[in-house]
Amino acid sequence: MIKKVVYYSIFTLLILSAGSDATAQNNQKSALKSKKAKPVPVESFKHTDIGNPAIAGSVKASENGLDITAGGVDIWGVKDEFNFVYIERTGDFDLVSRIVSLSAPHLYSKAGLMAREYLTASCRHIYFQVFPNNNPRNKNNGGYEFQYRQEKSGEMKAIYPKSFEGTPEFPVAYPNTWIRLQRIKNDFTGYYSNDGKNWKVYTTFSLELPEKIYLGMAVTSHKADDIATAKFRNIGELKH
């Protein structure tokens, strides 16, 4: 009788585990072709400079989006300088935007979607971002990159495309450079698209951030004495 109970328990656990894995796979598959995002009203966003850049950032509301101008040395290393346009968000999310353009005062000027623990310069965060073009950079021959800071005041790290050779797997194509950042519990997934409908996973990374975080668009010039401007359009959330 004891053996039967043990066998039954193991069998039950295997079924539950397989079911959980299948559900996760189905969720990701369904996310690859999305429904139309629900717009996030631009007036719901706040903005601030993080890390005291030498040139203050600014935000201008435009038709169907926001134009964000920023200074800042970089979002990298142990301390960030950039302009952040954000809302406070609790729990899971699936934020989408089309980046129409990003000016290029530097090869490493950046714009993208960020989930940030605090509004301090050295806090933990997830940053899925784009560069102004597809020129080769460190371990990356495309325009998208997934970056993160895992520990407070720790060095940032990046997840690069699998291949540095040949045609870029994740190229920017302004004005149709679509970017998407999704959170499910502590799993953060960056998605790439050129039409806002069909999505390709860039990567998924796990980071135990608080339930309540700061979520929005982050832009840095990567040049202390110059500015970068990114134009975000079609800012919305996908509902599941």
Image (cartoon, grey):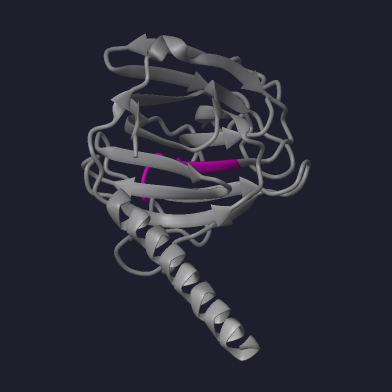
Image location of residue 196, percent across then percent down: 25, 40
Magenta includes 85? no
Q: Which residues are magenta?
A: 126-134
Q: Nearer the viewer, residue 7 or 141?
A: 7
- Picture layout, residue 109 above or below residue 33: above
Instruction: Say which residue appears at 36% left-offset and 54% top-offset.
Output: 27
Query: Which quadrant of the rendered structure holds the C terminus?
Result: top left
Residue 131 seen in the figure? no
Query: Which quadrant of the rendered structure holds the N terminus?
Result: bottom right
- Picture layout, residue 215 above or below residue 172: above
Q: Quadrant of residue 238?
A: top left
Instruction: Say which residue appears at 46% left-offset and 34% top-offset.
Output: 111
Q: Nearer the viewer, residue 193 or 68?
A: 193
Left/right of residue 175 with respect to residue 187 in the rendered view: left
Q: Quadrant of residue 65?
A: top left
Image location of residue 5, percent across then percent down: 59, 82
